[in-house]
Amino acid sequence: MTIEAIESKSPKTMRLLWQDPLGRLGLILTGFVFAMAVVGPMVFPFDSGQVGKDASSILQAPSSGLLLGTDELGRDVFRQFLMGSRISLVVGLMATLISTVIGASVGILGGYFRGKTDSILMSITDFFLVVPQMPLMIAMGAIFGQNLSIIILIIGLLSWPRTARIIRSQTLSLRERAFIVRAKSLGSTNLRIIRIHVIPHVLPMLISNTILVVAGAILAEATLAFIGLGDPNWISWGSMLHFAFSTGAVGRGAWWYFMPPGVGILLVVLAFTLLGHSFDRIKNPHGGTSS
Amino acid sequence: MKLLELNNVSIDYQQGTQKIRAVDDVSMYLNQGEFLGIAGESGCGKTTLAMSIPKLLPAAASISSGSIDFAGERISDFSEAQLNQIRWKDIAVVFQGALNSLNPVQKIVDQIIEPIMIHEPGISEKTASNRAVELLEQVGIPGSRAEMYPFEFSGGMKQRVMIAMALACKPKLVIADEPITALDVMTQAQIMDLFRVLAKDFELSLIMISHDLSVLAELCDRVQVMYAGKVAEVGQSQTVFGSQVGAKHRYTQQLLKSYPNIHQERIFIEGIAGYPPDLAKVQAGCRFAPRCDLAIDKCFTQEPALIQIGNDHQVACHLVPGDSK
């Protein structure tokens, strides 16, 4: 753990990721998805109000002018696809941020303080761990409404228990290490010990776990949007699939409408999963979160 | 002048519903500028006794009776907050297994300034770092090494770092728990020399714990031999280890025979048969009696008191006649 942890601060991590074939694929795919989400809508802005003027403009097959044809309202699918990547990523990243902050805090506090704090925090964690997440997300999504920030909150608030468990187990072994005892005897406050001695040690595992959570969060958003619980004001890949199915694009063989968001979701989840596992292998060679 | 005085200190470990007395009714003192060695086998209460001074005992252990006075204050009555004030600033510790006491992902300099930053609020990190480099040089590590990580250091160097860290706030008392145990003989000698030099530079008072009597004989002014949580013998090093008086307690005598002495002719290393007693089942009489080859009937029934037998020399043994004065 010693050398690996130090290197997490060095540019060597990137090189090691690049040397790992799957890690390299993950890096390329992630880079591609980010570029698409950031630059795409700037170059090809999408206007949801720009609908087709007559029946012939509906569900047009791809042509030289319309790379991915049109949807059921005659709107450009390619522009929609670019816009959707942005929303999918934003939801995935924001939800992961919430999940990581909660998971890491619960894990570190429980593992470090033990005792009552630990048993209370861990029983909450276990509760969320055993509750089937997807049905709960669907129920909460239906109750609290279809709003982007609420969707982010729901996904974030329901996907932290795994992180908490992993980080707690790391912290448990850390708190018994001699240098933590030494720091306590110096008169260090608990906050200081956590900041200086605990967090740097759990960071590699936290990062690799976080990357994996992103993949899950993106998938969760797509699922919610697909069954119609997405924010109707925003186009995401999930909601594109939803409308493709609900308006009969599938039955009419309009592959240009439902294939791109499906492949998009597949690739972005694959990208983060590959990256997360590869990072985990590099940083936690003795059995990390993914083993 | 007495810097530290312990009176009738007993320390219990709670094990399930049972209380195990690891240190039983021990009184000791340490003069200003003095080096005191505490010796004994594993599990005899050396570390527990020493760690009770800054109250750095494990959660299961507690001081059940007795008092500890340090520099004129009754620190055994101090609250945790008060203790945090004197820990490291007045009483610093070089922990057993110092090799693990360094955070592997933090630079050496950042670890040494930690006590300085905590105990001298308002000091700038730059000033503290400069002092850390100075300290490193005092313990014989080039200042250029300060920016390195622990894994780039050898065992002896890590031990020096721990000593530098102990000295960071110029404490009055340093407790060194087996500071040279895991090191090779050459490094041991270097670390011992370092303690001698630092003693002068820092006007140190030192409590050194070791199971190796020859090390204590070399370095310490006085030595206290413990057995099963009790003091067996305590006296000036030259009295206990010297040829004039010598060790009086059978345990000390046998302990001395258990280590080779490089200055003397080769002798047969005898060792002491048997094991230290289980502290959960303390029998009557002298605790060493079952292993003592000279034990008489009285040894098994009556516990010997620690008696004065000479100038600053006390022994707890029925076979040693007390000082008449």
Image (tube, rainbow, N blue to C red):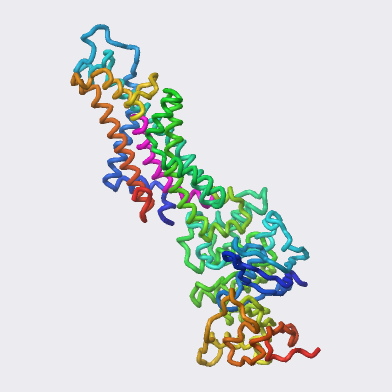
Viewed as shown, does residue B224 lie left or right of B100? right
Q: Quadrant of residue A216?
A: top left
- On screen, B25 above or below B266? above
- Magenta stretch encompasses residue A212: yes
- Magenta stretch encompasses residue B145: no
Q: Count all numbered tags in the image, as a single digit.
A: 0
- On screen, B198 above or below A208? below
Q: Pinpoint residue B152: horizontal percent, then vertical percent.
A: 45, 61
Q: Residue at x 41, y 51 (%)?
A: A7
Q: Pinpoint residue A285: horizontal percent, then vertical percent.
A: 36, 54
Q: Residue at x 30, y 31 (%)?
A: A265
Q: Pinpoint residue A1: horizontal percent, then vertical percent.
A: 42, 56
Q: Pinpoint residue B131: horizontal percent, then vertical percent.
A: 62, 57
Q: Quadrant of residue A88?
A: top left
- On screen, A58 above or below A206? above
Residue closest to the far top = A54
Residue closest to the far front = B17
Viewed as shown, does residue B139 lie left or right of A167? right
Q: What main secondary structure does the magenta stretch of the protein show?
A: helix
Q: Which residues are magenta?
A: A196-222
Viewed as shown, does residue A52 lie left or right of B248? left
- On screen, B88 above or below A223? below
Viewed as shown, does residue A9 lie left or right of A37? right
Q: Residue at x 42, y 42 (%)?
A: A129
From where the camera sits, is residue A247 visible? yes
Q: Quadrant of residue A24?
A: top left
From where the camera sits, is residue B144 visible? no
The front one of A15 and A270 is A270
